[in-house]
Amino acid sequence: MHKADIELVEMSMDVMKYAIDRLSSKKIKIGKPRKEEELKALVGETITEKGIGGEVAFNLWKKHLMKANVSIDHPRHLAFVPASPTRAAIMFDLVTSASSIHGAYWMEGAGGVFCENEAMRWIVSLTGLPKGAFGVFTSGGTAANLSAMVTARAHWRENDIYKDEKGLIITSVGAHSSIKAMAKVIDVDVFLVDTEDKLLGTELENAINSLTKQQRKRLFAVVGTGGTTNAGIIDDLGGIATICEKENLWFHVDAAYGGGALAADSVRHLFNGIEKADSITIDPHKWMFSPYDCGSVIYKNPELAKKAHSQEGSYLDIFKDEGADGFNPSDYQIQLTRRVRGLPLWFSLAMHGTNRYKQAVERGIELAQIAGKLIDESPHVELVREPSLSCVLYRRIGWTPEDYIHWTYKNHKKGFALVTPTKWKQGNVYETVSRFCFINPDTTKRDIEKILDSMH
Ligand SMILES: Cc1ncc(COP(=O)(O)O)c(C=O)c1O
């Protein structure tokens, strides 16, 4: 298994050919899931005592299994938060794998971590955080949000008064599901401000004033969102920062999706106030064109994260020795062993330069504006709200929730597009509507027109 022989050479050629074909193809299929029984019937037993051989296994992958995945980078995949990794980043993902780097500690991964840190410096510069702020790459936004919340609570509990208190955080209904999920993981309660629209500083203040004395004692952090997943809304980050400062609360900004737009001059002002955050989540695997998986968490004061996350063990002491000294990514988030998952981003940034990133993000924002205009001009559809960042919510006049679901499946089955419904609250009523999220700069106006046409 570990020998470099002719079989390895042949497999390498096959794998490289597959990678090149996938990367250069102008006609990638959107792909769709199949039932497990169907896949089993197609491929049979793949894990056997003797092995089925690389060629057979790879052919099963190409012929059946790959097709049962949705290509997240298809230009008409506009559901959820899609992705569109650059070719350079994908190729360097192969290099990252081939290089077998343990990315936890400088002692083992100095070259890779150096590159990650170069890319991180650019991301941090977009936030406007003060000197000394820094971050690390995580497996995604969920892990980044968790790492930030763990740091915030550990810092809060440094004060003995709070040692035995169960923590409480405030966020809004618009916050991503991972905030609530990760609060459960660390056994913290969540007070939800009942708005999916922009969370204002004044609403936060009212929420704090409505707490009981005991709840107020337990409150240690506020989570604002820099681009909600559902609608691309950016909270009043400046207003929230002011309240957090006044009330001595940790201010976390979840910009997992929207963070890429910090690079876009046309919308950068909407994030004003983010520079006052204590921690920020930004996912390069969303709007910074990295392959999965690549999130990041950034801290105004990374020393607080180190206090919360640094692992101890006699077998780890060597990493902290002066001779092995350097930046240790494991000290700042929940994972120990980690892939140097910022490396593909570094290579792509180094190759293309940051201006190309700016342009590609601006294109997503422009596509949302184009879609908004097309919707305004088409009598059978209408905007639910103005496009925000690269998200567009719109309704097909006269449709029931079932119509949206049926239309989604029909387009997906045909291999034409993947656009899924969501819900938007007007007053007290949740309405099922359609949603676009643009990430891929290869999506065209014609793609949007065709999707809208399919709603006739
Ligand atoms: C705002 C926001 N936060 C967090 C997440 C979770 O990120 P991940 O899926 O990378 O864990 C998402 C995912 O869409 C998101 O949009």
Image: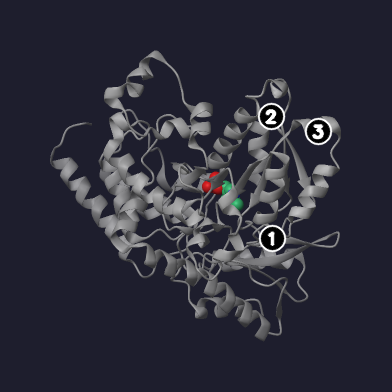
Which amino acid, mark 1? Answer: Thr
Residue denoted by label 2: 187
Check disc 3 and report its element: helix, strand or loop: helix
Residue 336 is situated, as x and y percent measured from the top left of the image, at 43, 29
Is residue 39 visible in the rendered image? The answer is yes
Q: Nearer the viewer, residue 241 or 54?
A: 241
Amino acid bearing label 3: Gln
Of 13 and 102, the residue lying toward us = 102
Disc 1, ligand 1: is the CB inside 8 Å? Answer: no
Q: What residue is rendered at 61% in x and 36% in y?
A: 149
Which residue position holds label 1?
422
Percent position (x, y) of residue 352?
31, 63
Residue 436, quarter of picture: bottom right
Instruction: Please state which of the two labelled residues, at mark 1 or mark 3, is closer to the viewer.
Output: 3
Q: Which of the marked residues, 3 or 2, is nearer the chain's N terminus? A: 2
Badge 2 marks a residue whose secondary structure is loop
- Marks 2 and 1, how far apart in space? 29 Å
Q: Which residue is mark 3?
A: 215
Question: In the drawing, what numbered circle is on residue 449?
Answer: none
